[in-house]
């Protein structure tokens, strides 16, 4: 009876939803390695302002998020660093597709739980960079 309940729970929800949830902790720092202030903008989530270096929580999502950072230095005309950070399918996202015969994939994808962002984000002062972008997430901007 216990096995039937667990299997039905697994089929009704996604593996990633159960095991990792919809929030991910990431580490953010600047290059050069100096303290600074950052602003994170993520689709459908309130913006975050925080001091770096820092560990922050972001909502897992299919969509990228943007970080803009300024160093805490007394120089004038310092150009902020900007990064667009892309997610990729997590190993639990793939596991959910297999274990729940696809039902979990629908749940995990809809909630964003099937995705992971890179755990270490380095924002380069004076540059605009893309982090985590590859051929698997090239079309992420398509439906915006």
Image (cartoon, rainbow, N blue to C red):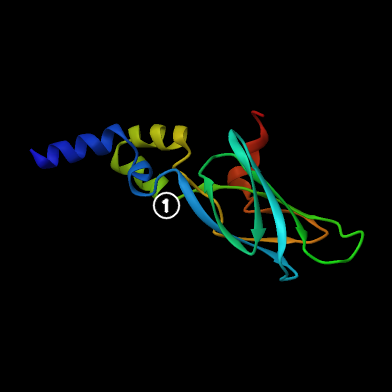
Quarter occupied by residue 64? top right
**Residue drawn at the location 46% of the way across and 32% of the way down:** 110
Q: Where is residue 85 in the image (x, y as percent from the top left)?
A: 64, 50
Q: Give above or below for 108 relative to 52.
A: above
Side of 8 where 86 appears, left or right: right
**Residue that mark 1 sits on:** 91
- Pick whichever, 144 or 67, lies toward us: 67
Q: Position of residue 27 (x, y in %)?
A: 57, 61
Task: Please identify the quadrant where the N terminus is shown.
Answer: top left
Side of 68 where 117 appears, left or right: left
Side of 100 where 58 appears, left or right: right
Q: Which residue lies furthest to the front in this view?
A: 74
Q: Which residue lies furthest to the right in this view?
A: 77
Q: Which residue lies furthest to the top in this view?
A: 143
Q: Where is residue 121 in the image (x, y as percent from the top left)?
A: 63, 59
Task: Please identify the quadrant where the C terminus is shown.
Answer: top right
**Residue drawn at the location 40% of the way across and 46% of the way down:** 94
Quarter occupied by residue 131? bottom right
Q: Which residue lies furthest to the bottom in this view?
A: 33
Q: Where is residue 29 in the image (x, y as percent from the top left)?
A: 66, 64
**Residue drawn at the location 56% of the way across and 56% of the way down:** 118
Q: Give above or below for 129 relative to 59.
A: below
**Residue drawn at the location 34% of the way across and 32% of the way down:** 103
Q: Give above or below for 5 relative to 69.
A: above
Look at the numbered disc 1 and give the secondary structure of its residue.
helix
């Amino acid at each position: 009876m216990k096995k039937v309940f667990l299997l039905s729970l697994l089929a009704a929800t996604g593996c990633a939803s159960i095991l990792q949830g919809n929030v991910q902790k990431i580490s953010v720092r600047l290059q050069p390695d100096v303290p600074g202030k950052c602003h994170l903008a993520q689709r459908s989530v309130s913006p975050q302002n925080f001091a770096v270096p820092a560990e922050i929580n972001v909502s897992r999502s299919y969509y990228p998020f943007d970080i803009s950072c300024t160093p805490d230095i007394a120089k004038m005309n310092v150009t902020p660093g900007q990064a667009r950070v892309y997610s990729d399918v997590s190993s639990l996202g793939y596991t959910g597709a297999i274990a729940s015969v696809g039902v979990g994939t629908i749940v995990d994808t809809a909630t964003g739980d099937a995705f992971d962002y890179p755990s270490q984000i380095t924002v380069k002062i004076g540059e605009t960079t893309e982090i985590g972008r590859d051929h698997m997430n090239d079309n992420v901007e398509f439906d915006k």
